[in-house]
Image (cartoon, helix red, strand yellow):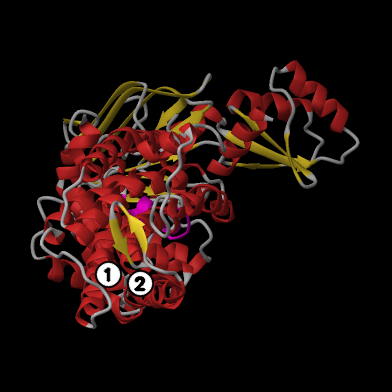
Amino acid sequence: MRLYLAVAAWQSWAVLKRHLVVYLRNWHTAALPPIFEPVILLLVFGVGLGNNIPAFDWKAQNVSYLAYLAPGILAYTVFMTAFFQALFAAYIRMHYQKTWDGQLTTQVRLEHVVWGEALWSATLGLAYAVIVVFVLGGFTLAGWLELHWSGVIAMLPLLFLAGVAFAALGLLFTAIVPTIDHMNIPFYLVIMPLGFASSTYFPLESDTLLAQAWLVINPLHHLAEGLRLLLLSGVWSFHLAAALLLFGLMILILLPVDFRLLRRRVLGER
Amino acid sequence: MNGKKAFATPLLLQAQGLMKSFGPKRVVDGVDLQCHSGEILGMLGANGAGKTTTLRMCYGFLRPDGGEIRIDGIDRVSDPDRTNRLIGVCTQDDTFDTDFTVRDNLLWFGHYFRPRPTDLETRVAKLLTRFDLARYADAKPDTLSGGYRRRLMIARALVHQPKVLFLDEPTTGLDPQARMSVWELVDGLRQEGLGIVLTTHYMDEAERLSDNLLVLKEGRVVSAGAPRTVLGDLVGEHVIVLDANIPEAGAVRQWLKDEGIGEPIRILNTWQIALDGAGLARFSAAFGQLRFEVRPPNLDDLFLQLTDDDS
């Protein structure tokens, strides 16, 4: 319980603030990926590839590939940003920069460092998602997309929660990978497949039991489909509730595991 | 006080019966220690003796399996927030925030404490001046020389004006001049009333700086007290230095065995044999014809003895 309560501790937010200050100092280079990545992806896949794909039926609607892709990129951005921060950036701070070791010689304890990393990853994931929303707004103004915007603001807390959950997954690998080179293993065997096989870039529909089970337990699938129904139809679907539940479970289960593993790795406690 | 240098100043750090095991191996086994205001307590021991583990329990990185630690009377385990506010930690490795400049490292460290250090900017400016870091204030820490990095580490540990300072091998890897300047800074901090706990592998450093020593071996305290007392307890009153290649080497070895002293410590071509006054008299009587040097023991002898016992 102490671990969960640490989310509200000033130390956790001090860690987040530190990351924010460092990030903002490098804003001119740091802002490039969140702005240009969705623009490029939407242009290359949505417009370029989409022009060669006829509109198709999805949930009883006829949608263009660009319209299908847009909410998927929004979900994918939160997922990848939060996960990447909690894996690579956190690992570098922990292992190479010794930032964590320095923080731990203060009133900041490991539970605060873990929460600080998770909250920061989620903050960045949310910020990048907001940038994607603006990019999608630009596409809408250009007449390339037709989206329902009414529920978008209400989605922000869910996107933040998604960021915390994906960060908890990233921290799990940060805690266990022996070296930075070993990050290729979770990245290419877990994260990339998860990122794509989650209704983000293409529809995933199958009658097989295995595929059905995968979709039921996959929070990114529910997030992508929930956002898609909201943005394309203005419908609040069960997918959003499922995503909320699964993200909550991920946080409840993964963060204590992260903490335990990191306590061993960082402090030498067994 | 059992040969311990006595202090009338407040007791700032008190640990009793500290225990720590990693798996089946007990690394710290019933360690007691104390440090008063204005005292430097030196912790000595060979690698694996339990120094760093003891220190890490004291500054909160590790949770003791048993025993109690009090910082200025407050229990370390039950109130980590308050006790962390009272201590400063300078770890052996540099743990700067490399994303910040020297000044910002000090300023940002202040943000990790509540209540916030009062007038933080003035405090940081004073530390930069005192530690001769002002000219590097806007540089990144990784551009500093080893000596200045250490200065920054110690300055950073003092931003919040702690009462107890932990220094884990603060001069390892420094050149003699840089070491001496760190010693002067540490000595100045002692005079200001900080309680300082120091671990080091440099015996001259421990001898010059420490008011009291704590010698650990296999996780236990084997001696504690003022440096001279500890040396007397563990090494002896005198150290004989003689050529190890003399024809009488076999006879000397046998004599040592008969006296229950065991093998002499060998350094290059010399033997170093620690003896008390009576032992020295007996050795002189037995080997009066040999040329040998007699000198007072130092902490190097102690360290060699501890490591020699281990081997």
Q: Nearer the viewer, residue A155 or B165?
A: A155
Q: Residue at x 59, y 35 (%)?
A: B238
Instruction: Name the side, left or right, on which B78 lies relative to B235.
Output: left
Mark 1, residue position: A132
Residue at point 42%, 76% (across, down): A51
Asked which quadrant contains residue A129, the reply is bottom left
**Is residue B276 placed above or below B174 in the rendered structure?**
above
- What residue do we see at 16% from left, 37% from top? B10
* Location of residue B58 in the rendering, given as x and y in whole percent from the top left corner: 32, 36
Residue B297 location, quadrant: top right
Around disc 1, counting alpha carbons within 10 Å, would you say few (fewer than 14), some (14 to 19), or many (20 or more)? Answer: many
- Give the magenta part as a residue range: A92-103
In the image shown, does A103 or B93 lie closer to the viewer?
A103
User: Cα distance, mark 1 to mark 2?
Assistant: 6 Å
| Most common SS among magenta residues | helix
Image-based side of A43 in relation to A162, left or right:
right
Residue A195 among those drawn in magenta: no
Q: Give amino acid for label 2.
A: Pro
Q: Position of residue B71 (x, y in %)?
A: 21, 35
Residue holding disc 2: A38
